[in-house]
Amino acid sequence: MDLKDIQNLIKFVAKSGASEVKLEMGDVKVTIKTGKDDKEEKTTYVQQIPVNQQIPQSQPVQQAPVQAPATPAETSSSDDSKYITIKSPIIGTFYRKSAPEKPVFVEVGQTISEGDVLCIIEAMKLFNEIESEISGKVVKILVDDASPVEFDQPLFLVDPS
């Protein structure tokens, strides 16, 4: 494996969004860490490539949609069956307020209407306001402020009655 192969592998890992990848080929071992410090562990599988074979220049990487509306969905828990879950439409960092000195968008117990901004999710330096598609009362906020969120991760429980 020469320097160009390693550079291409680093670029591929950076595009995949993985925080760490370990690759072993015979007596050669390569570990690449991207510097992301997520709370949840992510595992990325890298295909072993023989030393004499080129690393593919472009491989498809699955990514979550960049823009999508918050989609409410029924929860499966029996205690929360009467509540609607508002899920994250994108991956990024969850913020409860627009700036550190500003008030939070919603509190537990607050009544919300369709179109109200519930939070902001930052993805690649873009701040996306997440608006409610339902009216009701916020029962629970499921994510801590400034925490990373995944696509389709539950953010809020709302009582629609």
Image (spheres, rainbow, N blue to C red):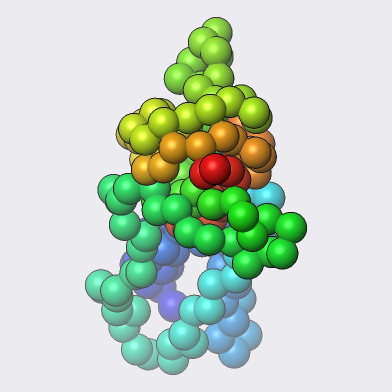
Judging depth in this view, the residue of 12 and 138 nearest the camera is: 138
The reply to whether residue 113 is in sight is yes
Which residue is rendered at x = 40% and y = 53% of the image?
71
- In the orientation shown, which residue stands out farthest toward the left? 58
Which residue is rendered at x = 61% and y = 55% of the image?
82
Report the side of 142 relative to 120 (left or right): right
Give the mark count. Answer: 0
Judging depth in this view, the residue of 90 and 10 nearest the camera is: 90
Which residue is rendered at x = 31% and y = 57% of the image?
65
Judging depth in this view, the residue of 58 and 77 nearest the camera is: 77
The reply to whether residue 51 is in sight is no
Kindly indicate the quadrant of the structure image that contains residue 79: bottom right
| Rendered location of residue 22, percent (x, y) | 60, 72
| Rendered location of residue 53, percent (x, y) | 34, 89
Kindly indicate the quadrant of the structure image that contains residue 100: top right
Image quadrant in which the C terminus is located: top right
Judging depth in this view, the residue of 23 and 69 nearest the camera is: 69
